[in-house]
Image: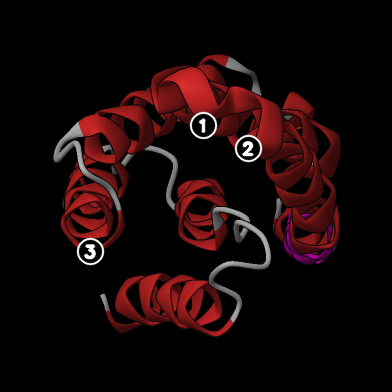
């Protein structure tokens, strides 16, 4: 549970430090999706922290409590279902990369749609958020790739 809290705190800290400059990537969501790869059958350890972390994010940063909580828990739930439906041989870093990038894009788009009339100025912020998420997702995919190789050796 400590790594989950730490990932939320890191995302919050980046948002505080970079507030007004750009939107931070969803580091917390990427970590939860990474965590799903370690214990794929434990759905509750991914969905509930996603909901709680999203709700805390809403209370701290947004005017609509529950939006990020719903986005995070829905995305985490879908990722767990997809990951568990794929056979063991298909659970690799490429699948993780697709899931994590899709999660980043979907979370950003839902927030963008909910921003309302000030969309023109926020298009750049959204684009920068998505591009700044790429290194985070790629590093996480490399960690997943290293872990998958170790798992394959054990089988």
**The disc label shown at residue 104, or none:** 2
x and y percent of residue 3 in the render? Answer: 39, 79
Residue 60's disc number: 3
**Residue beneath the point at 26% across and 75% down:** 1
Q: Earlier in the sequence, mark 3 or mark 1?
A: 3
Q: Is residue 88 visible?
A: no
The segment highlighted magenta reads: 139-148
Question: Is the Cβ of the residue at disc 1 closer than 8 Å to that at disc 2?
Answer: yes
Magenta span has 144?
yes
Q: Residue 46: x, y in percent? A: 31, 46
Give the residue displayed 56% in from the left and 48% down from the top.
Answer: 37
As measured in the structure, the alpha-carbon distance from the residue carrying label 3 to the one carrying label 1 is 17 Å
Given residues 78 and 105, the one toward you in this image is: 105
Please report whichever mark, 3 or 2, sits nearer to the chain's N-terminal start.
3
Residue shown at 73%/35% (left/top)?
A: 101
Find disc 1 in the rendering and name its residue. 107
Between 152 and 86, the one nearer to me in the picture: 86
């Amino acid at each position: 549970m400590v790594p989950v809290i730490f990932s939320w705190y890191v995302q919050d800290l980046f948002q505080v430090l970079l507030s007004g400059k750009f939107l931070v990537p969803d580091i917390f969501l990427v970590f939860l999706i990474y965590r799903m790869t370690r214990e794929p059958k434990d759905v509750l350890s991914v969905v509930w922290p996603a909901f709680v972390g999203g709700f805390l994010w809403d209370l701290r940063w947004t005017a609509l409590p529950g939006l990020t909580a719903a986005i995070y828990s829905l995305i985490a739930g879908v990722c767990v279902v997809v990951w568990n439906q794929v056979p063991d041989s298909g659970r690799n870093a490429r699948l993780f990369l697709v899931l994590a990038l899709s999660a980043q894009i979907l979370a950003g788009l839902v927030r963008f749609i909910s921003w309302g009339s000030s969309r023109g100025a926020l298009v750049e912020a959204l684009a920068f958020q998505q591009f700044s998420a790429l290194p985070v997702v790629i590093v996480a995919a490399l960690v997943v790739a290293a872990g998958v190789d170790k798992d394959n050796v054990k089988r």
